[in-house]
Amino acid sequence: MGKTLAEKIWDDHIVRSAQGEPDLLYIDLQLVHEVTSAQAFDGLRLAGRKVRRPDLTIATEDHNTPTLDILKPIADPVSKLQIDTLRNNAKEFGIRIHSLGDADQGVVHVVGPQLGITQPGMTIVCGDSHTSTHGAFGAIAFGIGTSEVEHVLATQTLPSTRPKMMAINVEGKLKTGVSAKDIILAIIAQIGTNGGQGYIIEYRGSAIRDLSMEGRMTVCNMSIEAGARAGLIAPDQKTFDYIKGKPHAPEDFPAAQSYWETLFSDNDAKFDLEITLDADAMEPFVTWGTNPGQGLPLNGSVPNPADIKDSEERGAAERALEYMGLTAGTPLKKIAIDTVFLGSCTNGRIEDLRAAASVLEGKKIAPKLRMLVVPGSERVRQQAMKEGLDKVFLDFGAEWRNAGCSMCLGMNPDQLSAGERAASTSNRNFEGRQGKGGRTHLVSPIVAAATAIRGTLSSPADL
Amino acid sequence: MEKFISHTGTGVPLRRSNVDTDQIIPAVYLKRVTRSGFEDGLFAAWRNDPEFVLNQVQYKSGTVLVAGPEFGTGSSREHAVWALQNYGFKVVISSRFADIFRGNSLKGGLLTVILPQPAVEAIWLAIEADPNTEIKVDLDSRTVSYQGVSIAFELDDYTRWRLMEGLDDIGLTLKQTDSIDAFEAKRASYKPKTLPIRI
């Protein structure tokens, strides 16, 4: 019987397999950032252990970094200590680090692909759940906890139980104004926040093939929001072209490519679960609640919890509406927004900035609204400036910031205040995620842009 | 890691579903570089509410958190496990845990027990009726028992063995160093390396 793409990669990385034990998997790359690594390095020090493969490890600063005045000392002493700790650990253990001010500083999941270090057929881990982003290249990439970060640093392997395999086929053609973000939000709304639990999801179908590499990254990025640790897409010519010319593209490109071309699910491969969605029917999507599964097409209205049959979901919807300050039946497009956040590992790449800028160009920001534009990496920021996008954003009335995770998780000073309502291109609308008491609606970059113009949740078609 | 064989304590009913790791500990509390002191961030947004279950005097000494389904979704932050442990929890019971949180908890010695939702609801009722109800979670027999009720739970033999022996995962893997060396010797040369730096 044939194998799925994920099974092929998994099997290629088994160091040791024994009855009744998890497989010991070899890890091709570990990405490291300041928030989930300090305790891991400490563990190594206590045990007198080294990093086994510094040359398969790379660090950057992203979660806790300021997006203003980045070259001044970090004001918050606790944040500063965390960043300094990463810098010292990188130095002590011989790990490459891209610090604030460096062209390759930025959100780990933007940095890996832009360096060409993310390649098909790899196993990639990071102490961050959005590591699934790298699956867009046909890699098994997943988030791990700090104990596992330490395990990989020490051994370059990870004991892992083989997940089940799910295929999500998105067939057809997206309408204008519908993007990768809408695909993944629609998928999560359909299968729920636990629908992918225990699975690796392979995204397939013509609408997925039609996406750019960056669009594919957006889809894979939010696999965790459907409960799956990893999501991936078979590599194709677009993947190869994207890697070619990047700093760490293989020197023997033909040898690498001939392996990459074997990375697809065989026709007779068996998936444990298969789901098909119709791309033609998809609309711009937005979340109304406090988990990423609570989403609807933008043309819809805030749902009435009384209409929800499942008592658990009904309770969750009631609590969500209370937290979000929304009334059932309100058209989503009537919801007024205070802040628009454009950025994150979901939608902070150059294509996302271009898409938003194309909607904003020549327009003015809605009164009283603030918009933060935070490029995913310093390199993305520089590219955007080369194209004059910074000027478009600034002329529009948005703030043009330095790279980092920023308001996606509200760990640095970029936060919502209590009751403040955001349209955000990030990945999580959890209670307080973007700041205590803050309210989040997840949207695509072009919906974010249209919303910043009109002041209420909107798509470019409403302009 | 400390061995986990059996734990007996009182329960804390957390009647909420989809408790994500941002609720367990918000990002602003993740700045410490130690593994301790995270209890102040545990359920930080809800702790202001005097009615919140952790603020109710009858549950102050609880060590078994009994939560709604989908506990621990979202971020991979192991700080969520540390916050629960630092606060004093030894066991979390739920009908469904998110994968990464569950992996982190079992690595760190916080036992996460999956019981069917009706069993969780029965425990909620029991501890709400009598907060002094003792709950025994026994890894040897893989059972949760209280008030004469005993419910079996599943946990794979390997994880159970590791927890009961208090074994260090890294130490176990380092015994396989020969296999890792052999694997590396066969790795394709075109696989990317981060060093030397190429820009």
Image (cartoon, grey):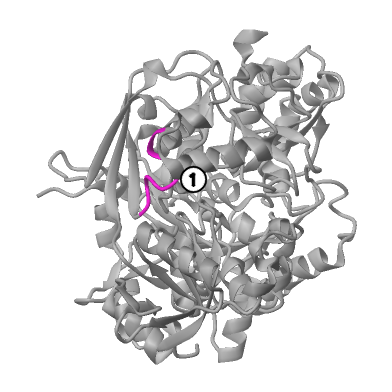
Q: Main secondary structure of the magenta part?
A: loop
The amino acid on which the numbered mark 1 sits, given as a three-letter code, is Glu
Q: Between residues A256 and A95, which one lies in front from this camera angle?
A: A95
- Residue at 44%, 74% in the rendered image: B106
Tell me, yes or no, whether the highlighted magenta stretch contains residue A153. Answer: no
Q: Is residue A49 above or below residue B84?
A: below
Towards the viewer: B62 or A112: B62
Q: Is residue B2 left or right of residue A198?
A: right
Chain hosting mark 1: A
- Left/right placement of residue A40 relative to residue A375 reads left
Report the side of A252 relative to B57 (left or right).
Answer: left
Front one among A376 and A324: A324
Provide the secondary structure element on which disc 1 rests. Answer: helix
Q: Magenta region: which residues?
A: A190-197
Query: As drawn, which residue projects farthest toward the front?
Result: B129
Residue drawn at 54 percent across, 18 percent down: A300
Please determine whether, in this image, residue A240 is positioned above or below residue A149.
Answer: above
Determine which residue is flagged by label 1: A225
Q: Check the picture and name the quadrant holding the C terminus of chain A.
A: top right
Name the residue rendered at 78%, 12% in the picture. Answer: A362
